[in-house]
Amino acid sequence: MTLRRLRRAVALGWAVLISLLHYAVERLRGPMTLERRALWVQVSSLRATRCLGIECRVEGRPPGRGLVVSNHLSYLDIVLIGSAMPCCFVSKKEVAGWPLFGLAAKLAGSLFLDRSSHVSASRVAESMSERLALPVPILLFPEGTSTDGAHVLKFHSRLIYPASQIGAPITAAAVAYRIDGGKLPERELCWFGDENFASHLWKALGVGSFTAILRFGTPKVYADGREAGVRTHAEVTALRGVGPVTSA
């Protein structure tokens, strides 16, 4: 297992460096619009999934625009969804400080949210409204945190409102992990609680074969943000096949 971890760690580090070099080359060819950044994200994510030995299975059709709302199990979700479609992300502000991965998130055009600041939420919502007019989906994890996968937490609707206000389509998505053919529980790959990023990544690098399953619903337009939050939560829960909880 240690050898597997080391081999994957080296491969992943190399993949990140190659992706950063790829970005630099693309930058020389002209301005990095959000559309070009999103395509770079997809190529980089595909490279990362290969390095991590992730078999990705996509069910349903990834949208070409609008807001995508998903449950959140781990930072691995970003790589999985990013490999399925060109997109940009709303991330917690802490991600910006991660070694290499934080730089990659900045280059991808991610919107960084300070979850404790209403001012930050308002600024992110304003930026989302502008971006939702572009042909680049925005990925949002409205639970506000990653979980152990047992339940889909209540959605925080504040950042769903920009899509409903301008009539942009909202697509529900669900992420699931299947490890060693179901021999190990999904929570072995989930990042939750107080575990730090480095220790979880080291653990994830040692996991044997696993399949990442991504299910997309049908894009829908909602006139009310609160209704959108309730309905997309129910849809994500159904796609996941787990029970909901009512606590925030």
Image (tube, rainbow, N blue to C red):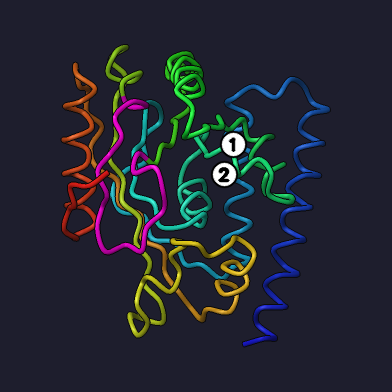
Instruction: Please tell me whether residue 175 belongs to the stretch shown in magenta.
Output: no
The image shows residue 196 at horizontal and vertical percentages of 58, 62
Question: In the rendered view of the protein, which quadrant contains the C terminus?
Answer: top left
Report the residue at 33% width, 25% height from top.
158
Cα separation, mark 1 vs mark 2, equals 5 Å
The image shows residue 136 at horizontal and vertical percentages of 48, 27
Q: Nearer the viewer, residue 45 or 98?
A: 98
- Up-down: is 81 above or below 151? above
- Up-down: is 169 above or below 205? above
Instruction: Please tell me whether residue 145 belongs to the stretch shown in magenta.
Output: yes
Q: Are marks 1 and 2 in contact (CB under 8 Å)?
A: yes
The image shows residue 7 at horizontal and vertical percentages of 71, 77
Q: Nearer the viewer, residue 200 or 51?
A: 200
The image shows residue 67 at horizontal and vertical percentages of 37, 29
Query: What's under tag 1, amino acid-wise?
Result: Leu
Report the residue at 35% width, 39% height from top.
142
Report the residue at 51% width, 81% height from top.
208
The span shown in magenta is 142-160
Q: From the image, tell me which residue sits under label 1.
A: 39
Is the stretch drawn in magenta largely helix, strand or loop?
loop
Question: In the rendered view of the protein, which quadrant contains the N terminus?
Answer: bottom right
Instruction: Using a 10 Å C-alpha cutoff, classify the residue at mark 1 as few (fewer than 14 neighbours), some (14 to 19) or many (20 or more).
Output: some
Q: From the image, tell me which residue sits under label 2.
A: 42
